[in-house]
Image (cartoon, rainbow, N blue to C red):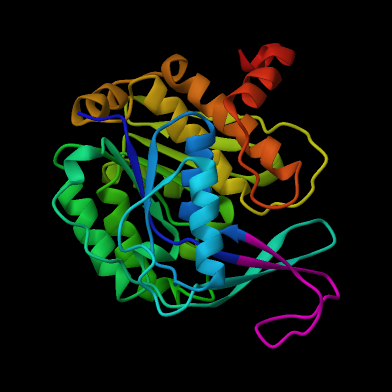
Amino acid sequence: MTDRTLCLGEALIDVVLRDGAGSGPDSTAAATEHVGGSLFNVACGLASLGDPTSILSWWGRDVRGHRIAETAARAGVDVVAGSDSAANTPLAYAHLDAEGRATYEFDLTWDVGPVGDDLERYGHLHTGSFAATLAPGADRVHEVVSRIHDHATVSYDPNIRPALMSTPTEVLPRVTEMIAMSDVVKASDEDIAWLHPDEPVEDVMRRWIAAGPAMVVVTRGPWGAYALLAGNRDMLHVDQLTVEVGDTVGAGDSFMAGLVSGLLDAGYLGSRYAARRLRAAQWSDVQPALHRAVISSALTVSRAGAYAPSMDEVEAVRARDRSLR
C-alpha cells in the first residue's frame, strides 16, 4: 500500500475580477490570472502540507496549460500522463465582491484521459466539484472511484457550481451516488442550500452519514464547521479562526486539503484498513485533523488567491493558540 494521494478533477486558470472590473469571457477590463481549480488547489495544498500527491486532470498544451504544469511542478505535485490532452485550457471567471467573496462563470470542457492499470499506487483518492457531474468526464470519474474503492479510501467535495451543474434535480442523483461511495465528504452550507433548499443542514448531514461515509463535514464560513462521525451520534461544532480576509478563493479547497492531510497522517485514510479505523473513530481521534483543516483555510483566506500553506505555517498557528493543540 502506498501513501500517495490522487486528486481527480479540474485544473484551470482563475481569471479574477473585482467589483467594477467587468465580467465574463468578453470583458476587456484588467484582470489577474491564477492557476486554480478545486482539485488542483487540493493537490497543491496536500503537497505543501507534505503529502505525496498526483493529479489527473484535463487542460491544454497552450500557454495557460504550460503554466498549470509548471505550477504543479513547483508545488511538488506529480501530473498523471494525459492530463494535458484538452483542446484548450479551461477558464473560470471569479467575480469578487467588496468583501472578497467569489462567484464563478466558466469557459471549459471536462473529460479525463486514460487512467491505465496503476491505481494500486494510490492509497487515497480525492474528487468532486463539477468533475464528478459534468459530462463526458463525470462518467470516467465514477469509473475510477469504483475501481479504486476496493483498496483505497475516497474523499468527495460536491463544491457546487450552478453555472455548470444545470439544476439540483439533474445533479442530485450523481452527487448522492458519490456520497455513498466516499469515506469522507466535505461540503459547504451553500452547497447544501442549493442541493436541498429549505432543509436544515443538520438533517442533510445525518442523511448523508447514513448513506455510507465515515465522516461528513460542512463548512459554514465565519461560523466554522459542523462534523459528524459514523461512530458517534453527537455533532461537533468547530470554530473558525478570525483573520483579515484577502479573498475566499480556494478557502474550501484548503480546508479539504488540511482535513485529508490530517486524516492521512493519523492513519484514518490511505487504505481500507484505515477506513475501518475511521468508522470507529471518536472526536478526540479526528480533532487534530479538523484543526489542521480550519488553520489551513484561515491561512488561505488571509492571502489573495488560492494560497497553499505549509505545515510549518500551520504548526506556527497551533503553537500560538492553545485551543488548537
| In the depicted structure, whether residue 238 falls above or below residue 43 | above
Which residues fall within the magenta stretch? 14-34
Q: Quadrant of residue 36?
A: bottom right
Residue 277 location in percent, x, y?
Answer: 27, 21
With 21 as the anchor, is 110 left or right in this view? left
Residue 33 is inside the magenta segment: yes
Residue 2 location in percent, x, y?
Answer: 25, 30
Residue at image coords 56%, 33%: 293
Residue at image coords 53%, 40%: 45
Residue in front for this viewpoint, 277 or 205: 277
Residue at image coords 39%, 66%: 84
Residue in front for this viewpoint, 275 or 30: 30
Q: Quadrant of residue 278?
A: top left
With 106 as the anchor, is 136 left or right in this view? left
Q: Is residue 198 visible?
A: no
Residue 213 location in percent, x, y?
Answer: 31, 40
Total marks placed:
0
Residue 126 is inside the magenta segment: no
Residue 24 location in percent, x, y?
Answer: 68, 81
Q: Is residue 158 visible?
A: yes
With 235 as the anchor, is 147 left or right in this view? left
Q: Main secondary structure of the magenta part?
A: loop
| In the depicted structure, whether residue 302 falls above or below residue 83 | above
